[in-house]
Each structure stands twice: as structure tokens, then as C-alpha cells.
Image (cartoon, rainbow, N blue to C red):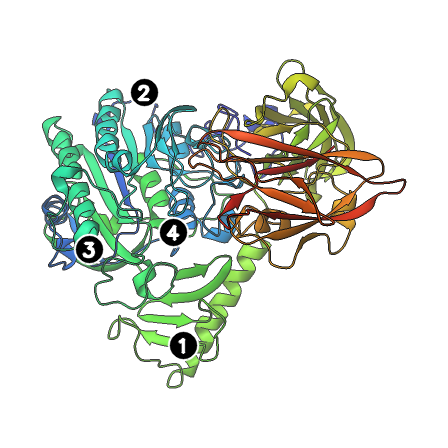
């Protein structure tokens, strides 16, 4: 569900109050555009920007922030040559929301990225959001994304669709079922990370790519977003850095990262770019199991300071004061308005930003009173900081008995002493701030755009994809309009546009018919993947935005219960499950699904029970199905891209319909098939899935045809 490249988003036009490309020209054309011609060189005063985002680095993990066990001479030198902020905050206490907040300058519920995105999910940073890269690219910057993306699978939410000129990196590194990991260059998979030894090379390779990106920029100013994968688990380090630190492998990977960042900083000096380049270093959240919070309370996933207060360093010789320690309160949410200001770009005023311009703080002036800092757990506002006061109103877990809690962070940064009882007026004032902010987020109208939701489709059968128009309005403000929604599909597909008169203020959706050709189903072990593009016209005028999505085509059948719905085109299969036929007997039959203990979950945050429940198990599990009338073929797909897969036995009504088969090698897939009779009216059957050797078994897809 990503934006089509070059879809009118980099032209820098406000999209809140217009609907069509033709009217875009009369909207505020300076919004998001440079204050000077885009071809102006670096000498025009707009700085290069190097943004380094470390992964799970704790507040106390660098030497310049007090670490006695990890040596970070290059980052320490960077801090000595610039300003080190002691009250710097990430955008959230976990990865994906923090990265979306950094890129957009908006709190997690505004972007919709409120939790960690799993590899099997099609969600991501919405195409309607505008990023730092988008604004700066419109101002003539070369924009490079390097390293960890993790705001949507690159097949559907590629950095190139969010304003970046180039991308080299990966989606994310997960602690479970880590390998293989696709490695991307721009919009193509160019390799994979297959083991810890490969993972250990990424810090070096990403540094090499950052240096190459600086050189590719030529005379253009550059914005390089270098998102490291360390020290997030799993930890992996090249041999020359192993066993060097006093903090185990965790310390080793930080020291290796510091070494390679030193190479990057040296490149800026060698190219004569030091004084022309603003370098900012921060972390996406606090440390997880290992790492130091520098005496603060809490860790990753917490809204206590240890989960959200992070190292925050800025350097630009001659502009940012050197040898300076600042207690100003700063946040990664401030980076978008700050970078736009430095580049002479005015952010789209129709989009609410939650940060503030750090320009005065970066010049050494006392930072003006800033907006409050809001801390989120998922989509729930959990705490607020205003000045020295921090009020907690929610926390992780079910025990909320002692809330609200109030802390004076100037005198008690560890949040050890609750002062709510002594300061009821402050509590009441901060509670009002929270209520007002929650209301502003809840009532914010959606950003204008097209959203395409393309679930799995049946080969040779007509299906539908959903095209939604958000935040559109006619120039005269009237809501009624004639909208045509259409989908561009690969050659051989059949599609039909849909035209309706709708109320634009209702964010209308359209079910657009599409039919994949019958020959699109590949051999077992791979599902066919195709890119679809949605477009719309309003009263005959093309809407200024498009959207695209990856569609998966599964073998046709009369009633498909489950099917694979994840992975990248031509990439590894990733398990993810959903109900495919809205209104089918599977959807409407209460109680159908897993009976008793369900298999171990892999996609715990998915919207429907099937995706949450099914993947792998050691114990037997029973799946209840509604079989339509007549004889039906049931196909079960097993296999795994990265691991060998054991055989599976299937029983129904005491009869073994699939005996335990042979193990299959990693990267291979096997369809097990059997026939069931639904009778004249259809019937309910229980399938018992197990392995006779009591080892883990795995099911990727189940089709009823």
C-alpha cells in the first residue's frame, strides 16, 4: 500500500484543499519547495545532513554519556566537536513507531504506525504521510536511505516511494526466525543475509554505502539517513572486533559501529564537507535486555525515561557550538521541522507536526519553551512531559492501580518518587493537556490520498481490491462528486473501473473488480505476486495521488480457508493468514477455527484470528472447517525458506488422511492433498494436525477446492 513513485508528491503542493492535479498548480506552490532554485549548489548555505539512527542503543551506552565499559572514541569526538543533549527523546519506546515519528515529525497514532511491524504484515507508513526525505528532495537534495527501514515491507512501502532517491538496506532484523533477510537496492532484492556472519558485515557495508551516497550527490546537497541494525538483537560482530570490549558482544557491536562511523566522519573531513554538514546521532529507543540506561528507570517498551531518553548529538563546525552539553529538551520529532528550516523548505501547513524547530538550540541559543513531549504505548497516550514535570497515566501490563504518577525530572530523573499527592493542581493541568492532545489526534482529518488494499486473489476468478479515497475535497468545498476508481494490473489481467457519485467527506471506498489469468499460479512452494496500481478521477479530473500494492494469487477454489499472504515478489515465503472470502461460511460460522489449544502464534497483532493462531506447533492441534457440499480437495502446504521441515500427519474422524511424510529441506515446499465429502448440504469436520515424533510441525497454507 505504497505511493506510486513520481505521483505528484515531490512537487511540494498542499493537498488538503484540492483534489486534482489540475488544481494543484493554483494551490500554495511554495509549500515543500526550496526557497531558491533546486539546482543551487551546496555553497548556497543549505547544509548537507547526515542522520545516524542507532538501534536499541541505551542512554548510557556511549563513553560521552558515561559508559565505563564500552569505548566509543569517534562518537565521543563527535560530541566534543558539537553539542551533546542530555534530554533527548525518541519518538516511541519501540522501533517502527519511533522510525515513523522520526521521518514524519508526527506522533505514532497520527501515522497509524503504532506498534512493531512484523515481517508478515502488509501495513506500513501510509502513502499520504510526508517525510523529511520528501521535503528535502523537493528542495534539490540527494536523499539516501541506508540500513534498517522497518516502516513497511520494501515491496509495498519502499523508501523510494517516500521521497528517497536511493535505498540500500533491509526491512528489519527479527529476533525469531531471523534468516534469511532480503537485502534491497532501490526496488530490487539484490541479495540476502543468511546467517550471523552475514549480519556482522552490515555495519561495514552500510558505512561503505553512505560514503558512496555522499560521492553520488555531486554538487547537490545531500540528506543521508543511516539507520544501523546494531545493537539490536541478534548481536553479530566481525572477528576483528570480537572480545574487545568489557561489555561482551553487546559492547563489541557498539565499538564496531563506532569504528565504522569514524570512517564516515573522516570521509566528511577528507572531502572538505565538515563545515557544510550537520551530523545528528540518536537512537530509536532505549536498550532491550542488555545495555545501559545510564541510571534511568525502565527500558525498551517502557515510557519511563530508560525506554525513551536516548543519546542525542549534533555537530556542524562553525555553527553548532563545540564542547557543549545542553539540557534543552529535544526530540526526534523536532528533526523534520529543523531540517526543513535549514533547507529553506516550508512544511505543508495542512499536516499537523508535533515537533519544533531546533535551530536556536543548534546555534547555542537557549531553546525557547517547547511543546510538551507526549509518550505513547501503542496507540495509547501514556505520559506527558512539560518542563520538569512528567505525568504517567498508563503503563505496560494490567496493573494500573497507582496511576496517575507525577515526577520532577529535574531532581528525580530516575522517576523514583511520586509527587502526585503533593501537586494536585499540576496533575490536573497535565491531565487536561493529555485530554486535549488526544482529542486533537482523534479529530484530525485524514490526509488526502489514495489507499489500495489488495488481499490474496484467486487465479482465473474475479475478485476485488479496495480503493479508498481519503481527505479529498472539491475546490469549492462541496462534498458530492463523481469518482471513478481504477486499477492498473499486469498484462493478461482483467479489470473494470468503478464510477459512483459519493460524499468525499466520508472517505469513500470502491470495490474494483480484478481477475488474474488462470495461468498465474506457479508450482507449489511459491505464490505468484503482482504489483497493482490504483488511480482515481474526481469529476473527470485525475486525482493527484496514486497508490500501489502487492497482490498474491492463490490456486482457485470454491472456498479457500487460508492462504499465504506475505513475502516479496520472487522472495522467500513468509507465513501470514487471513480469511479470503468475505461473507463465506468460514467467516460467518461462529466457533469454527482452532478447537482447544491453538498452534504457536507468529503474527500476534494481526486483525483476524486465523493469522494470529496458525503457524507452528509441537503438540497436536485441531482445526474445525466447514466443508461445502460435494467432494472437495483439501491441500495443505508445508515448508520453510530457512529451515528444514518435518512431516505432518492429518486425521479426521479417527482416519489418517495424510500419514506423516518425509522431512523436506530448507527452501522446499510440499503440498499434501486429500479428499473430503461435504455431502448434499456441506458439513463440519475436525482436522487433527500432528507429528508422530512429537517435534515441531508447520503449516503455511490450507486450501479447500
Q: Please identify the quarter of the rendering in which residue 501 is found.
A: top right
Q: Please identify the quarter of the rendering in which residue 702 is found.
A: top right
Above or below 225: residue 106: below
Residue 482 shows which numbered tag? none
Upstream in sequence: badge 2 or badge 4: 2
Separation of marks 2 and 1 at Cα, in angstroms: 53 Å
Which residue bears the numbered disc 3? Answer: 61
The percent position of residue 354, horizontal first and vertical second, equals 42, 52
Q: Is residue 113 left or right of residue 417?
A: right
Residue drawn at (24%, 75%), measured in percent from left and top?
A: 411
Q: Nearer the viewer, mark 4 or mark 3?
A: 3
Which residue bears the numbered disc 2? Answer: 39
Helix or strand or loop: what does disc 2 sit on? loop
Separation of marks 2 and 4 at Cα, in angstroms: 29 Å
Upstream in sequence: badge 2 or badge 1: 2
Residue 355 shows which numbered tag? 4
Separation of marks 3 and 1 at Cα, in angstroms: 28 Å
Above or below 503: residue 154: above
Upstream in sequence: badge 3 or badge 1: 3
Upstream in sequence: badge 4 or badge 3: 3
Amino acid at each position: 500500500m505504497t505511493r506510486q513513485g513520481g505521483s505528484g508528491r515531490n512537487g511540494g503542493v498542499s493537498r488538503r484543499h484540492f483534489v486534482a492535479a489540475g488544481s494543484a498548480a493554483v494551490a500554495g506552490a511554495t509549500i515543500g519547495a526550496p526557497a531558491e532554485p533546486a539546482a543551487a549548489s551546496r555553497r548556497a548555505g543549505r547544509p548537507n545532513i547526515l542522520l545516524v539512527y542507532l538501534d536499541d542503543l541505551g542512554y548510557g551506552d556511549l563513553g560521552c554519556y558515561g559508559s565505563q565499559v564500552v569505548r566509543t572514541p569517534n562518537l565521543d569526538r563527535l560530541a566534543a566537536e558539537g553539542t551533546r543533549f542530555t534530554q533527548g527523546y525518541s519518538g516511541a519506546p519501540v522501533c517502527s513507531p519511533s522510525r515513523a515519528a522520526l521521518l514524519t515529525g508526527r506522533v505514532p497514532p497520527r501515522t497509524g504506525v503504532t506498534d512493531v511491524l512484523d515481517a508478515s504484515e502488509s501495513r506500513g507508513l501510509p502513502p499520504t504521510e510526508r517525510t523529511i526525505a520528501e521535503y528535502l528532495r523537493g528542495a534539490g537534495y540527494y536523499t539516501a536511505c541506508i540500513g534498517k527501514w522497518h516502516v513497511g515491507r520494501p515491496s509495498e512501502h519502499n523508501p523510494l516511494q517516500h521521497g528517497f532517491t536511493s535505498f540500500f538496506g533491509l526491512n528489519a532484523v527479527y529476533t525469531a526466525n531471523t534468516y534469511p533477510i532480503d537485502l534491497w537496492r532501490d526496488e530490487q532484492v539484490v541479495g540476502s543475509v543468511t546467517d550471523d556472519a552475514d549480519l556482522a558485515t552490515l555495519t561495514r557495508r552500510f558505512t561503505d554505502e553512505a560514503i558512496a551516497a555522499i560521492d553520488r550527490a555531486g554538487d547537490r546537497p545531500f540528506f543521508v539517513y543511516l539507520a544501523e541494525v546494531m545493537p539490536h538483537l541478534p548481536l553479530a560482530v566481525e572477528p576483528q572486533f570480537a572480545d574487545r570490549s568489557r561489555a561482551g558482544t553487546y559492547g563489541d557491536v557498539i565499538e564496531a559501529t563506532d569504528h565504522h562511523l569514524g570512517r564516515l566522519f573522516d570521509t566528511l573531513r577528507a572531502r572538505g564537507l565538515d563545515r557544510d554538514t550537520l551530523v545528528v546521532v540518536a537512537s530509536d529507543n532505549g536498550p532491550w535486555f542488555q545495555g545501559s540506561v545510564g541510571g534511568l528507570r525502565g527500558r525498551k517498551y517502557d515510557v519511563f525515561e530508560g525506554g525513551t531518553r536516548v543519546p542525542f548529538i549534533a555537530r556542524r563546525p562553525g555553527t553548532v557550538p563545540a564542547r557543549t552539553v545542553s539540557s534543552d529538551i529535544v526530540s526526534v520529532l523536532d528533526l523534520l521541522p529543523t531540517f526543513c528550516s535549514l533547507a529553506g523548505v516550508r512544511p505543508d501547513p495542512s499536516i499537523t507536526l508535533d515537533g519544533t524547530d531546533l535551530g536556536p538550540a543548534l546555534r547555542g541559543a537557549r531553546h525557547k519553551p517547547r511543546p510538551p513531549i507526549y509518550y505513547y504505548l501503542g496507540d495509547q497516550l501514556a505520559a506527558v512531559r512539560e518542563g520538569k514535570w512528567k505525568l504517567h497515566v498508563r503503563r505496560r501490563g494490567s496493573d494500573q492501580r497507582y496511576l496517575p504518577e507525577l515526577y520532577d525530572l529535574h531532581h528525580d530523573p530516575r522517576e523514583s518518587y511520586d509527587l502526585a499527592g503533593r501537586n494536585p493542581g499540576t496533575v490536573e493541568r497535565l491531565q487536561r493537556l493529555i485530554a486535549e492532545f488526544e482529542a486533537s489526534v482523534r479529530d484530525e482529518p485524514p490526509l488526502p490520498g489514495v489507499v489500495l488494499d489488495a488481499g490474496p486473489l484467486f487465479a482465473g476468478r474475479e475478485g476485488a481490491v479496495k480503493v479508498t479515497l481519503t481527505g479529498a475535497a472539491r475546490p469549492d468545498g462541496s462534498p458530492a462528486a463523481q469518482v471513478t476508481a481504477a486499477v492498473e494490473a499486469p498484462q493478461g489481467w482483467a479489470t473494470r473501473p468503478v464510477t459512483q457519485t459519493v460524499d468525499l467527506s466520508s472517505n469513500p471506498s470502491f470495490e474494483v473488480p480484478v481477475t488474474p489469468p488462470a495461468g498465474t499460479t506457479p508450482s507449489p512452494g511459491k505464490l505468484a505476486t503482482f504489483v497493482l496500481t490504483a488511480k482515481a478521477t474526481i469529476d473527470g479530473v485525475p486525482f493527484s495521488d496514486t497508490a500501489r500494492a502487492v497482490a498474491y494469487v492463490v490456486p482457485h477454489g470454491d472456498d479457500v480457508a487460508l492462504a499465504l499472504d506475505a513475502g516479496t515478489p520472487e522472495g522467500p515465503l513468509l507465513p501470514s493468514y487471513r480469511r479470503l472470502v468475505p461473507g463465506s461460511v468460514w467467516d460467518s460460522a461462529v466457533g469454527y477455527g482452532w478447537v482447544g489449544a491453538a498452534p504457536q502464534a507468529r503474527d500476534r497483532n494481526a486483525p483476524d484470528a486465523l493469522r494470529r493462531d496458525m503457524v507452528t506447533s509441537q503438540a497436536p492441534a485441531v482445526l474445525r472447517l466447514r466443508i461445502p457440499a460435494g467432494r472437495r480437495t483439501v491441500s495443505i502446504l508445508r515448508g520453510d525458506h530457512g529451515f528444514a521441515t518435518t512431516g505432518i500427519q492429518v486425521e479426521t474422524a479417527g482416519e489418517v488422511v495424510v500419514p506423516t511424510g518425509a522431512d523436506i529441506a530448507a527452501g522446499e515446499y510440499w503440498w499434501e492433498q486429500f479428499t473430503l465429502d461435504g455431502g448434499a448440504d456441506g458439513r463440519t469436520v475436525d482436522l487433527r494436525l500432528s507429528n508422530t515424533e512429537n517435534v515441531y510441525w508447520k503449516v503455511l497454507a490450507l486450501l479447500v477446492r
